[in-house]
Amino acid sequence: PTEQRLLGHTNPITLPSGRTVEVRANIASLVEAERTRAVGADGVGLFRTEMLLEQAGRLLSIAEQEEIYRDVLRKSSGPVIFRTFDIGADKPLAFLDMPSEPNPALGTRGMRLYRTHPTLFQDQLTALYRASEVAPMSIMFPMVTTTEDWDFCRDQAKRVASTVSSSPANDVSLGVMIEVPSLGFLVPELALHGAHFASLGTNDLSQYFFATDRESDASFHSGLALLRFIHAIAASARDVQLPLGVCGGLAADVPWAILFAAMGIYSLSVPLPSVQPIKAALSRHQEYEKLVAQAIQGAHDYARIMDLLKQEGP
Ligand code: PEP
Ligand code: MG
């Protein structure tokens, strides 16, 4: 699996160094998939599939899911990353029987639920692999915390892939969200254990990094400590050649988008209305690539870097 295989972008930004950065869309429905072309997105970097269940108000059969996934692949402007169901905490599903826990954000959510609800996961994987006949696609797992979590998800996916009749005509890349801080220290293991790519989920990564509710105080969701942490994750991803993207809210924040580009992130995924503004900002700020890279390597003066990046305005 190479970065090349994941790209296939329609119109990525080329930086002065020659590296390209694609800007994809975060979506949650077929209607939004249909809008990716109009906004000029380089594909879909995050399809929040659990929203399909929320919209339906019930679980969807394998056939129902397969039809939607096929349509999403047909309608999207480029390659699609499907994030498997991320249920629990800020994304509860009233109709699903879930454990009642004192701290749901620290409890059974994301892939943790797949251990207690194996059919939910296997059915979704079956629908995804069947739909992969339409186009090459990627599957990404939420809330992976340990290497064992990753192995569990990967093994389930491989097992389902081998049972889907008429072996899938197209490649399916398997990746992982880095949104629990512990996983940020396991990038070499992820590469070694067969992850094809990873994507930083900065909403949850910030929440668990700063011990601050993602639903409340936004002022705690970035800062010097996070910059250093993400810079280290990006460096270890480069070391092991694991393609690293960003699909959390910080990808749509202009100064941070420029920082990510300077760190070697190959793909940003943002809400539909942010695709063009982020593309425009990355094109305008190209002259900052070297400067910012040096600033990040050096003193890590967060306030100074932010001032520099904000001077030109979004
Ligand atoms: C994230 O956590 O940053 C993310 C992109 O996923 P979600 O917001 O759906 O939890
Ligand atoms: Mg998340």
Image (spheres, rainbow, N blue to C red):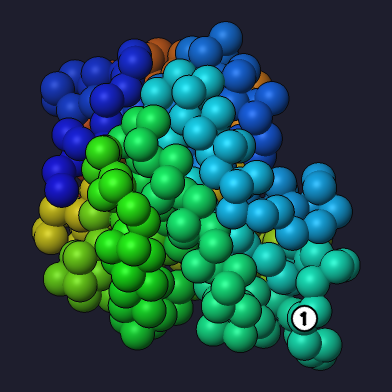
Q: Residue at x 20, y 72 (%)?
A: 193
Instruction: Report how many numbered discs are placed on residues in the image.
Output: 1
Residue 205 visible here: no
In this view, the residue farthest toward the front is: 165
* Residue, far top: 38
Residue 82: give x, y in percent of width and height.
48, 46
Above or below — where is 97 with respect to 131? below
Relative height, residue 219 to residue 4 (above, below):
below
Task: Answer with the quarter of the image where residue 62 lies.
Answer: bottom right
Q: Quadrant of the C terminus?
A: top right
**In-image side of 143 versus 272 (left or right):** left
Name the quadrant containing residue 66. Answer: top right
Q: Residue 37: image x %, image y %?
A: 52, 13
User: Image point 81% across, 57% down: which residue?
Assistant: 58
Q: Mark 1: is the Cβ under 8 angstroms from ligand 1?
A: no
Relative to 108, 275 lies left or right: left
Residue at 14% x, 53% y is: 241
Hey, what amino acid is under mark 1?
Answer: Met
Give the quarter of the image for residue 237.
bottom left
The answer to which of 216 and 31 lies nearer the viewer is 31
The image shows residue 153 at horizontal and vertical percentages of 40, 72
Question: Which residue corresponds to mark 1?
Answer: 98
In percent of width and height, residue 170 lies at 26, 38
Q: Residues within 10 Å of mark 1 (few under 14, many from 20)?
A: some
| SS for dot 1 | loop
Residue in view at x 20 percent, y 36 percent: 5
Q: Is residue 257 above or below residue 9?
A: below
- Residue 176 in sight here: yes
User: Could you say which is closer to the camera, residue 62 or residue 299?
Assistant: 62
